[in-house]
């Protein structure tokens, strides 16, 4: 291997919300780096100023923070290979573009946007490539003197890659094995734009070289760009320095048809972004996994299994286990279907596994949003612990536990109507009158006391359970009813029953 140190990077363009596929790329980079004692780098690829979105970089870093996948070097922490934003490296790239022109692997193209537009309207599938470049206005077709003049006059130009004729380009991908591309299928990509900024293709190769990147894990959608990158490596730095490539399988829609997009998520009612993203231009918010009530542990675990497994059938992994077990050999080639129900299953498993104290702060924030106030933190955690088995999302705690903090505002009468009798009402009244005799306010004692009262009235305790639940929480949900009463405390239980008796 050309590199003795493992150095990997996540190189997002800050253009909006962070797609779960992006987080999976982060995760695989991170796992590989940690497993090999290497370095994980964040590089912001913001050379396309027309696509720049304010706030997107800070948002990406927040997402990584939430997931616990923080890079070792990057714009947020610096590092020996900075700056880590390509817009701040603008002056670096030009000389490489010029070097390519000198070597004969790139050329100046003077075609104006109008000329290109006209050409496209004449030939709808027009590509600036091996076949057409001879008909265009560039340093391959114009006399050398005229090229010099145009450059001296400051005529706008771009620098384009000169794709070789009729050549097979080959590379080894760590996931896909040998991959071949025919040079003539690829267009002559712009490397340096008229505004002097590099395009992605030039910048990514130059920076991977300068930042000594050893392995590139990126989505399969970048595979078609790879022939351009291979050539740039060969021409500029020599293939010996090239990183090893690993193109990760696509994340597919639940039906397996096509790549999962944000639009699919909107349509099918599940998040695609890691966290809520508000578009600064339109003000529109797209919901993310975090705000939908996912635990980062579950989100990361679920992502790891989108395209990878350890072969043992195990599905629940901590981050440390993932670091230990991750292997490139076990990444699939085929696209991985996203299944929201399965994602919720992971979350449920993690909610059950983690102590409620671990996520209480997050749930409290959700309660705040629902205007449910918590005054006793300790009993709050106890209550979350009691109901967590019933929750798939952290937001489910609102229904499963919110009633502990807010008396019911309505009662599901229909559920008990048929069995509700004046005698039953009298029985509850009698029970309340004897409440003070219940010495220890614990589920078993409360149950025992209700049973005793019911017997004196010739009623069955079991018939009283559903009405009691409706009185305490309003509906047919929640954990065992005497546990609810215990946690509510004697006074609150009494108040709720008294209030309900006025309504039922
Ligand atoms: N800037 C590219 C992106 O937005 C990076 C692709 C790569 O990793 O080479 O995903």
Image (cartoon, helix red, strand yellow):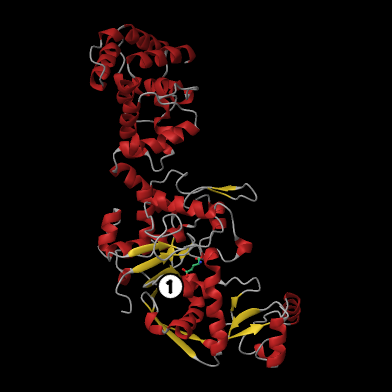
**Is 108 positioned to the left or the right of 167 in the image?**
right
Q: Residue at x 49, y 81 (%)?
A: 232
Q: Residues within 10 Å of mark 1 (few under 14, many from 20)?
A: few
- In the picture, the quarter occupied by the N terminus is bottom left
The spot of residue 157 in percent (x, y) is 67, 78
Q: Where, by quadrant of the figure, is residue 51 drawn?
A: bottom right
Q: Is residue 375 above or below residue 395?
A: above
Q: Is residue 467 above or below residue 358?
A: above
Q: Residue at x 49, y 31 (%)?
A: 370
Q: Is mark 1 within 8 Å of ligand 1?
A: no
Q: Where, by quadrant of the figure, is residue 445 drawn?
A: top left
Q: Where, by quadrant of the figure, is residue 402 drawn?
A: top left
Which residue is labeled 1 in the image?
210
Please indicate, yes or no, whether residue 229 appears anywhere in the rendered image. yes
Please indicate, yes or no, whether residue 346 appears anywhere in the rendered image. no
Front residue (pair 49, 365): 49
Q: Is residue 327 above or below residue 57?
A: below
The spot of residue 294 in percent (x, y) is 41, 46
Front residue (pair 225, 5): 5
Front residue (pair 315, 32): 32
The spot of residue 394 in percent (x, y) is 41, 40
Classify mark 1: helix, strand or loop: helix
The spot of residue 8 in percent (x, y) is 38, 67
Q: Residue at x 49, y 61 (%)?
A: 253
**Is 126 positioned to the left or the right of 162 in the image?**
right
Q: Is residue 45 above or below residue 320?
A: below
């Amino acid at each position: 291997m050309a590199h003795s140190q493992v150095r990997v990077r996540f190189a997002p363009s800050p253009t909006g919300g962070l797609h779960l596929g992006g987080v999976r790329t982060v995760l695989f980079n991170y796992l590989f780096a940690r497993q090999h004692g290497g370095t994980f780098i964040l590089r912001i690829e913001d050379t396309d100023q027309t696509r720049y979105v304010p706030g997107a970089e800070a948002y990406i870093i927040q997402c990584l923070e939430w997931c616990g996948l923080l890079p070792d070097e990057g714009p947020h922490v610096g590092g020996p290979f900075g700056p880590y934003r390509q817009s701040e490296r603008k002056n670096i790239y030009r000389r490489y573009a010029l070097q390519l022109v000198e070597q004969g692997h790139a050329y100046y193209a003077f075609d104006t946007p109008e000329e290109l537009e006209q050409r496209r309207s004449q030939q709808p599938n027009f590509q600036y490539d091996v076949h057409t470049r001879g008909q265009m206005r560039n340093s391959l077709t114009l006399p050398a003197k005229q090229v010099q003049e145009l450059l001296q006059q400051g005529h706008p130009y771009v620098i384009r890659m000169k794709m070789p004729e009729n050549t097979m380009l080959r590379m080894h991908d760590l996931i896909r094995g040998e991959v071949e591309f025919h040079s003539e299928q690829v267009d002559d990509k712009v490397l340096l734009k008229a505004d002097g900024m590099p395009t992605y293709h030039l910048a990514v190769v130059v920076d991977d070289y300068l930042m000594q990147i050893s392995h590139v894990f990126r989505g399969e959608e970048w595979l078609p760009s790879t022939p351009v990158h291979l050539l740039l490596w060969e021409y500029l730095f020599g293939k010996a320095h090239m990183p090893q490539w690993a193109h990760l399988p696509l994340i597919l829609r639940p039906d397996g048809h096509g790549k999962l997009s944000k639009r699919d998520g909107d349509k099918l009612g599940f998040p695609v972004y890691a966290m809520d993203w508000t578009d600064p231009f339109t003000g529109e918010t797209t919901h993310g996994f975090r705000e939908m009530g996912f635990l980062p542990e579950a989100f990361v675990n679920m992502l790891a299994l989108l395209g990878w497994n350890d072969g043992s059938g195990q599905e629940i992994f901590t981050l440390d286990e993932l670091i230990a077990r991750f292997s490139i050999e076990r990444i699939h080639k085929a696209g991985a279907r996203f299944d929201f129900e399965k994602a919720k299953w992971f979350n449920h498993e993690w909610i059950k596994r983690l102590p409620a104290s671990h996520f209480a702060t997050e749930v409290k924030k959700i309660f705040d949003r629902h205007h449910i106030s918590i005054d006793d933190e300790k009993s709050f955690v106890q209550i979350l612990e009691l109901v967590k088995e019933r929750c798939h999302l952290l937001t489910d705690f609102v229904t499963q536990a919110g009633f502990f903090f807010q008396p019911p505002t309505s009662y599901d009468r229909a559920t008990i109507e048929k069995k509700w009798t004046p005698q039953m009402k009298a029985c509850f009244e009698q029970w309340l009158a004897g409440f003070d005799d219940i010495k220890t306010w614990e589920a078993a004692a409360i149950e025992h006391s209700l049973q005793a009262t019911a017997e004196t009235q010739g009623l069955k305790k079991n018939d009283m359970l559903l009405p009691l639940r409706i009185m305490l929480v309003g509906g047919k949900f929640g954990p065992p009813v005497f546990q609810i009463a215990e946690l509510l405390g004697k006074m609150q239980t009494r108040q709720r029953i008294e209030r309900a008796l006025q309504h039922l």
